[in-house]
Image (cartoon, rainbow, N blue to C red):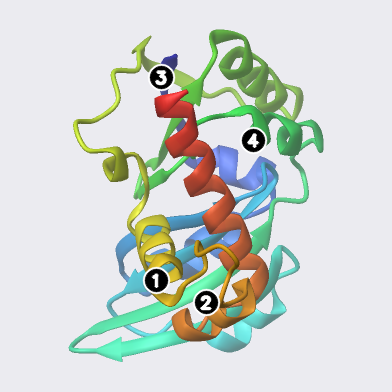
Amino acid sequence: MREAHVSLSNPAFDRMGIAELVSLSREAGVLGFEELACHGTGAVVQVAVETPIDEDRLSDLECVDWWERIADSGGDHRYLIAFTAPELPEGLAERADELIGTCEPNVTDRGATLSLVGSQETIAATVDEYETAGISPELRKFGTYDGRDHPLAELTDRQREAVRTAYEMGYYEVPRTVTSEDVAAELEVDSSTVAELLQRAERNLLGRHL
């Protein structure tokens, strides 16, 4: 298993068709950025900001599929935002399914960094798909993926929350005592988001142990 750290510059957001979404988030003062689900050409993200995002402008963005303001507390405003980057090739959706690790982004004023975990062939094909769209990710680090000491450390915070909630509610009982819709209601998110969070969490865990 291999891991690549790549970076994208600000002009890449323009080529992807999501520059306005990134700009809106930055204007509100980004405190945290977590990817909850990724489908290659887009994602569902949780964004924490210092001040509320301009919601009228957010609703008008063509790249935004839906959004929800989920929390306000002590100078921390949190949003769930589902978006699709219209200029990315559809082949990235297939590549995203082949990656073992999620491409969790770290967004800064200068761009973003992504961590890609999978076979060397899959990582190379993912980078090729970006280059097809005129985006040239800069490879910052590439090597063997050693994983982490605790299995759940392979998951994002949101994936861990989804798995723990599903387990505690009886989603993994035989037979199941709750549905993904029940888990989604408990987490106050869309059922499709929960389904993808659980699927990716299970894939990451199986990829470590099989």
Which residue is label 4 attached to? 96
Q: Residue at x 48, y 48 (%)?
A: 201
Circles 2, 4 touching at the beta carbon (< 8 Å): no
Q: Residues within 10 Å of mark 3 (few under 14, many from 20)?
A: many
Q: Earlier in the sequence, mark 1 or mark 4?
A: 4
- Which secondary structure, mark 1? helix
| Quarter assignment of residue 59 | bottom right
Which residue is label 2 attached to? 183
Q: Is residue 73 left or right of residue 209?
A: left
Residue type, label 2: Val
Q: Earlier in the sequence, mark 4 or mark 3?
A: 3
Q: Residue at x 45, y 77 (%)?
A: 79
Marks 3 and 2, how far apart at CA: 31 Å
Is residue 126 positioned above or below 92 on the image?
above
Which residue is label 1 attached to? 165
Which residue is label 3 attached to? 3
Residue type, label 3: Glu
Q: Residue furthest front?
A: 174
- Which secondary structure, mark 2? helix
Q: Earlier in the sequence, mark 1 or mark 3?
A: 3
Q: Mark 2 or mark 4: which is in front?
A: 2
Residue type, label 1: Thr
Q: Residues within 10 Å of mark 2 (few under 14, many from 20)?
A: many
Q: Residue at x 34, y 17 (%)?
A: 145
Marks 1 and 4, how far apart at CA: 25 Å
- Which secondary structure, mark 4? helix
